[in-house]
Amino acid sequence: MSRRYCCQTSGQQNAFNMPRYFSLFVALATAFALYQYSDFVGRGVQVWLGQDEPSRQLPGWSPSSYIGLEADITKRDAIVAAFRHAWLAYERDAMGADEYHPISRKGSNLTEEGGIGYTVVDALDTMLLMGLDAEYQRARTWVEEKMTFERDADFNTFETTIRVLGGLLSAYHLSGGDALYLTRARDLADRMLPVFDTPSGLPLSMVNLQKRQGVHDKDNPGLVSTAEVSTIQLEFRYLSELTDVDVYWKKAERVMAVIRTARMPPGLASIFMDVREGRFITSAIRLGSRGDSYYEYLLKQFIQTDRTEGVYREMYEDAVQAIHDHLVQKSLASGLTYTAELIPERNSADPHAQLSWRLTPKQDFLVCFFGGNLLLSATRSGALVQDVSVPPRLEELSEVGRRDWTTGVELIRTCMDTHDTKTGLAPEIAHFRIPSDNMQSVLNAPGDWYIKGARAGEFPPYDARYMLRPETVESLFVAFRLTGDKRYREHGWAIFRAIEAHCRIPSGGYATIVNVDEVPVRHEDKMETFFLSETLKYLFLLFSDGDTIPLSKYVFNTEAHPLPIFTPSIRTGFS
Ligand SMILES: *[C@@H]1O[C@H](CO)[C@@H](O)[C@H](O)[C@H]1NC(C)=O
């Protein structure tokens, strides 16, 4: 049973509660009205607010919560302590294994042929950033002496790229150019190149690293996920930039050219493509799994090469326009902004029947990256100046940038609302109320969202879990860096406290919980590698100062590995 049926909102956990928003709105509306009606009064208001020149702020902005980008050392150190609690347990029980199970205190590997450094490589750059020298040196030694890709088994192309290749490349950069990592990165990428040998140029989902062979995904033969083929470009392009060997760049770029040609009319992209023909297959359209990082990497490729490749801005802007036209929705009671999914349906067994698209009010936890992504795009592709202020001023953003900023702020607010559960952690999937859902008659029906299929006394549905995912804190980090607004740190700290309270295993490590609406919690025996690589890194950066991995110099891959922005020496091969 979802908390939406049983408990009252505890306003304390959620700083974005309605009364506070309302008073903020009244204050802003009053200030704006005064500004409109009289320059003199408006000027007075600005002086009173501590601003010495007239400026117009964007929605969601509250001058009283601006704190700048100084570090909060106490909180930052608490995140480092949590990282050590997680890492030292892994090192004690499972060093070198791909995955860690903190309750049974065991490691396991993705395949029976042995590990490929999934956890170790994913965690390297976090240790470098946190200044954990002893831990880092031991991990480096493991990479030098034990890590091998000589494994006769199939590995997922996308996951291996974002975690292992991405982890090696950011470790290379942040270590000041330790050649060990570049050698390993190149070895891995060379073993993966054959995945691109398909008629379309789209990469196969799996790769045998020893045989150097692309392999079809057995569950979806002939198909590839849109997000998976379009979320390897930052890594392969940076490798070419570092090595002066352009084959990595060219193979990854070709995928983008195929997608651009295959684009469906309104700028949206289905989650599956045909790997032979390079076409979209009729399948769901969403910002959640198998769709998410397609949108992310369109923007980030534009940012990676210092905004020189206009084709990615264009593709990104088309996609975000389509998202606004088709997927952005408001929840029933409080008008929370969320993104729905479009599911294709044929109304009868007749294959010639008209295809229709059903709007499904379901949002994955994964979608919570998108709030921060929109704030970032508002200040990059949506900016009228090279360097926008912190926080951005209205006049610095284009109309599209302002729209994206507003949607981004609202989406982050929605994601925070989904943390309003008994544990303070958000579920894997939230369903939003719509007028036709027949829930009006249900006693204490939730106003805005609920966990589908949750019933008292039964094992919780998959949707109810929290698996240490980073997407909300990722958006909070980006939002804080772009605004200096302390509310984003407050939210991040509340999430960290909830993780400490409910996911921490006393003997070491952190674990997934199976129901965010149940206290005391039940754990599942798994600590995902992205907890070390992403969740704790974004939390650490949220409380670090603004010069630690500044967004003006770095772009994060989808596994939170920071890669430097550069001026490309290779020209975009399509337009
Ligand atoms: C996993 O692979 C590593 C090599 O990277 C090996 O040392 C370890 O024994 C393997 N673990 C299991 C549980 O098979």
Image (cartoon, rainbow, N blue to C red):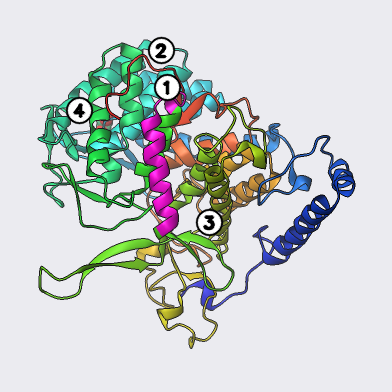
- Going 50% across and 26% down the picture, which residue do you hit? 554
Q: State which region is magenta.
A: 304-325
Could you tell me the amino acid type at mark 1?
Ala
- Whichever of callouts 1 and 2 sits on the residue coming sooner in the sequence is 1
- Looking at the image, is mark 2 or mark 3 nearer the viewer? 3
- Residue drawn at 26 percent across, 29 percent down: 252
Q: Which residue is mark 2?
A: 178
* Marking on residue 534: none
Instruction: Specify few, some or many for label 2: CA neighbours under 10 Å numbering under 14, 14-19, or 20 or more.
Output: few
Numbered disc 3: secondary structure: helix
Identify residue type, mark 3: Cys
Query: Considering only order in the chain, which callout, 1 or 4, is on the residue closer to the N terminus?
Result: 1
Counting residues from the start of the chain, the first of labels 2 and 4 encountered is: 2
**Alpha-carbon span between mark 1 and mark 2:** 8 Å
Q: Nearer the viewer, mark 3 or mark 1?
A: 3
Q: Which residue is mark 4?
A: 192
Residue 348 at what x, y percent from top left?
15, 76
